[in-house]
Image (cartoon, coloured by chain):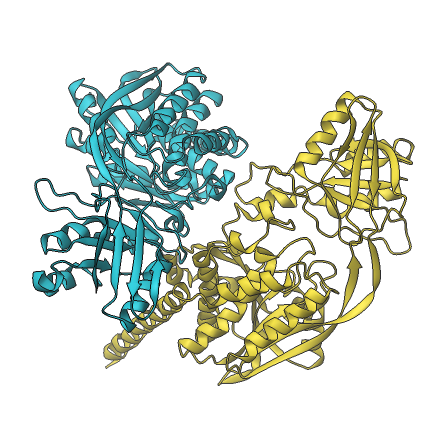
Chain colours: A yellow, B cyan
Amino acid sequence: MRKLLVIILCLLKVSGLFAQQEKVDAIFRNALTSDVAYENLRILCATTAGRISGTPEAAAAVELTRQIMLQMNLDSVYLQEVMVPNWKRGEPEVARIVSQRFGTTDLTVLALGRSVGTGKDGVLAPVVEVNDLSELETLGREKLEGKIVFFNRLVDQRHFNTFDGYGGAVDQRFRGPAAAAALGAVAAIVRSVTTANHDYAHTGVTRYVQDGDNIPALAVSPVGADLLTYQLRLDPELQLYVRNTSHMLPDVLSYNVIGEIRGYEYPNEIITVGGHLDAWDNTEGAHDDGGGCMQSIDVLRIFLEEGIRPKRTIRAVMFMDEEIAQRGGNRYADLAHERGEKHYFAIESDRGVFTPRGFSIDAPSPEKLEAIQEMEKYFEPWGINEIVAGYSGVDIVPLKNYYEMTLAGLIVDTQRYFDLHHAATDTFDQVNRREMQLGSAAMAAIIYLVDALDLVSYDR
Amino acid sequence: MRKLLVIILCLLKVSGLFAQQEKVDAIFRNALTSDVAYENLRILCATTAGRISGTPEAAAAVELTRQIMLQMNLDSVYLQEVMVPNWKRGEPEVARIVSQRFGTTDLTVLALGRSVGTGKDGVLAPVVEVNDLSELETLGREKLEGKIVFFNRLVDQRHFNTFDGYGGAVDQRFRGPAAAAALGAVAAIVRSVTTANHDYAHTGVTRYVQDGDNIPALAVSPVGADLLTYQLRLDPELQLYVRNTSHMLPDVLSYNVIGEIRGYEYPNEIITVGGHLDAWDNTEGAHDDGGGCMQSIDVLRIFLEEGIRPKRTIRAVMFMDEEIAQRGGNRYADLAHERGEKHYFAIESDRGVFTPRGFSIDAPSPEKLEAIQEMEKYFEPWGINEIVAGYSGVDIVPLKNYYEMTLAGLIVDTQRYFDLHHAATDTFDQVNRREMQLGSAAMAAIIYLVDALDLVSYDR
């Protein structure tokens, strides 16, 4: 009798495994034969390029994604108010080398996000090239006063994961200009933090010091940086003329956009899947992160089409303002807390919509990490075999301020991302439908498993 | 004493593991910081687009790759004569729907490789649409005599590996036209075997019947195929006008291009690394397979730059004429046999130069497969974790006619390949430097390990 029970339990377990694999496979097959998210991304890119927070394009992106979800037969679609930064690039920037030996040479530049302007007359000053922040400190105020600091460190291409290369160089963009300002520099020009070797500048946010000195800060294209370092070597006396009219206006009202499928068993427990809706003003933001938004909406579409009824409420969230001040993500977490919501699991796609390779799990205990790692077997037929401890995503990480919960980031093939990240090259034609759809499926499948198997458990 | 020996042996083994890992890592880092192969591919694409066998462009590609290798300080660089097909597309093809209901509609088409022409007046005939070859057989001569057969099966997008989808549809291109001819059809139009949904036609070789009926055979773009099937449904009486002047000329002399680093211990044992130099006449052939050629040459560069002296002779081979009759690959194997060469291992890159995921191993015994599978640990830091039994490559597989040896194919991410395979969209700008270079490194590393560790053993 006891033996029979064990056999029955084993059979149930095995048939459960089969059922789960079948569901995961159905999710992937659905995604691979759909072009809905891809075509929605085409429209987002074509109509709202440059949708940095505070712009009409960002407002249009809010309305577009709201309309898309309103037509999907979801249980609810709504906006969440959030005040966002309203930084303006101003007139096209100028960076011009003025050299006795080489004459004048214009460089391709873009002001960094939050940069102040030079004033309309611009700034003309000698250039001091540094490799990193410690070199800057070593030079000190005496060598830097009145100068333009040129941060010229390259991304280290030797890493397999380009996020490692990016992470090793991005401090010069984020912290460099403020550090140079503190030592008396009059402007900063920063080599674009990119794996590409081309004449596009890659922007991105730089640190702004409240009640302190802030200097104009511009990203220069790799080609421009190479030109500048070459001319500097042969003519250390050259001067650089920089002009930009960037400025910050008062915060404006914007929105996170949310669509939900209500859970049938625990409707008050929330699973969040999201990306950020804003993108730099110089780009379509196809990979960063229009694609992640459309994948998140696609998770809901897949659940509806495959008839998967989730136990818990699944929310697709388009976060506003990831790029400048992360207001959308913080607002989402604050509101969740204020309203007493229960948050069970969250996943973000914000590393480009390339072929998925795994999930990066930020779990509150080794057991919860392992519970998700045990799901790897379901993903192997779909090329996903990297479920590891790691960072989730900028927009969902504020949930940790209030919840001891499991967060995840979709890991994708990273080789191409920093060729286009924050540059005009981040266009829809750089997105492959199948790669993007595998990402939608990967997120839908992990959410299905986490929810159906109660993977990360919860005190109710 | 005995214990000490065991400890020493263990230490040697561990230090060996470290040494091998270090070498593998050095190979990858070298590749990721080099742009030599990538820039060579740029030149190949810019100067020899359309280099199908028999063309001046193919001859130029032979000379270009020979010159590249002559400048590399290799032990020898030489050509191998091979007679190759000389098929000509002729004038731009026409395929025009003539419908009482819809008027005339031109479709985007390309003659399939080896197709005969319609004659200069073209062919006008009713259209019979079929899904597959068995439907063709069922219809039989009565329904097909005097008709144009339209093969309209789509690639099944539900497979993760796009080669599975391609393999499930390509019979209509390769065998369909000859089968239709045998049943009295006057021409065949075949839906492009592609994962993309665009207005480019994807060509490719079709079966030619010696001493039998051969009819004009054209690939139509996915957009064109959709138009044709739509109009056919509403106007089954429509006719299609097809015109092409494709024809086969007598074989011409061409070459495989070979560069070698001589082995210091077993110079008479050969390790081959290759790709094919020809590409369809409508494309730059960046991924298929200019990239594979430049990666193969790059394996030699990496060995030289990293100071890795191979025990065995390593040959980079640019095979001529993979696309039409595989003459280069067959010639290479025949000559190897005639000359009494010893062939130890061969690897080919001909699946596009995307991020490598593994190796497909065709080994003469399970032990030799396992010996290579045990190397997986060295590749894990570089994202490669799929060493499986499988097919190697079209150009190296003829070696099996004479040698009981281990062959390998580089497995890459397949999502994008059939968007561009055999179409005008296979251009250099679709190649990512890092993805390509990871492939060069993967091949260099597996060759290094196979050679240094005598992995596949050999009767000397």
Residue B183 placement (x, y as % from top left): 10, 56
Is residue B61 toward the left or the right of residue B430 in the image?
Answer: left
Quarter holding the N terminus of chain A? bottom left
Q: Residue at x 50, y 65 (%)?
A: A39
Q: Which image quadrant for residue B134?
A: bottom left
Relative to A148, does residue A236 appear above or below in the rendering?
A: above
Relative to A105, does residue B212 appear above or below in the rendering?
A: below
Residue B460 placement (x, y as % from top left): 20, 20
Q: Residue at x 70, y 56 (%)?
A: A281
Q: Residue at x 44, y 60 (%)?
A: A438
Residue B217 placement (x, y as % from top left): 23, 49
Query: Can I make out residue B1 in this image?
Result: no
Frontmost residue, A74 versus A379: A74
Is residue B308 toward the left or the right of residue B251 in the image?
Answer: right
Q: Residue at x 48, y 81 (%)?
A: A311
Quarter holding the C terminus of chain A? bottom right
